[in-house]
Amino acid sequence: MNIHSQSTQASDKSLEAMRHFSETYAQRTGTYFCIDLGVTAVVIEGLGKHKDELGAPLCPCRHYEDKAAEVAAAYWNCPCVPMRERRECHCMLFLTADNEFAGDQQQISFEQIRSTTAQG
């Protein structure tokens, strides 16, 4: 890893894949990103990092004893089972319109994500 940010940020390919997935899924399910797009950016970055490291977008907002086992079980792979079944997103990535933290956005740019997450 000759790029210092490589260890802390998702690859461009995975980040773009997760950004596109998130926008499409929000539109398809009628959900919205958090009113604070910084939250959205950090979650999408985390999904991208897990996609790079684990081969699947494991929910970045939970602690796992064994991430590889969790990926294989698929329960917490985004969109996780609680989201698919009940529209409950622990990460606050996909929020229903009646959620007090829901914004009105279903889109976020690659640059918005990178500029937010590069600060950490």
Image (tube, helix red, strand yellow):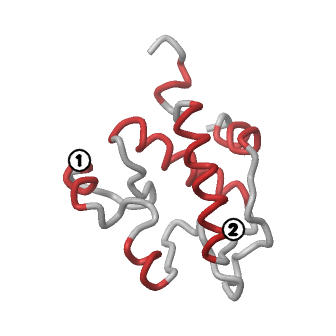
Residue beneath the point at 42% across and 58% down: 59
Q: Depth check: 8 or 82 in front? A: 82
Q: Is there CB contact under 8 Å for labels 1 and 2?
A: no
Q: Quadrant of residue 27?
A: bottom right
- Residue 112, image x and y in percent? 76, 44
Mark 1 element type? helix
Mark 1–mark 2 Cα distance, whole angstroms, equals: 28 Å
Above or below — where is 85 with respect to 5?
A: below
Q: Quick check: 19 left or right of 88?
A: right
Residue beneath the point at 59% across and 65% down: 25
What type is the residue that disc 2 sits on?
Answer: Cys
Q: Depth check: 53 or 13 in front? A: 13
Q: Residues within 10 Å of mark 1 (few under 14, many from 20)?
A: some
Residue beneath the point at 42% across and 82% down: 85
- On residue 44, the disc is none
Question: Among all residues in the image, which is located at the extreme right?
Answer: 104
Q: Quadrant of residue 118?
A: top right
Mark 2 element type? loop
| Mark 1, residue position | 68
Q: Depth check: 15 or 63 in front? A: 15
Q: Depth check: 7 or 44 in front? A: 44
What type is the residue that disc 1 sits on?
Answer: Ala
Who comes first in sequence, dot 1 or dot 2?
2
- On residue 34, the disc is 2
Above or below — where is 37 with respect to 53?
A: below
Q: Quick check: 44 left or right of 116?
A: left
- Residue 13, image x and y in percent? 56, 33
- Residue 117, image x and y in percent? 64, 41
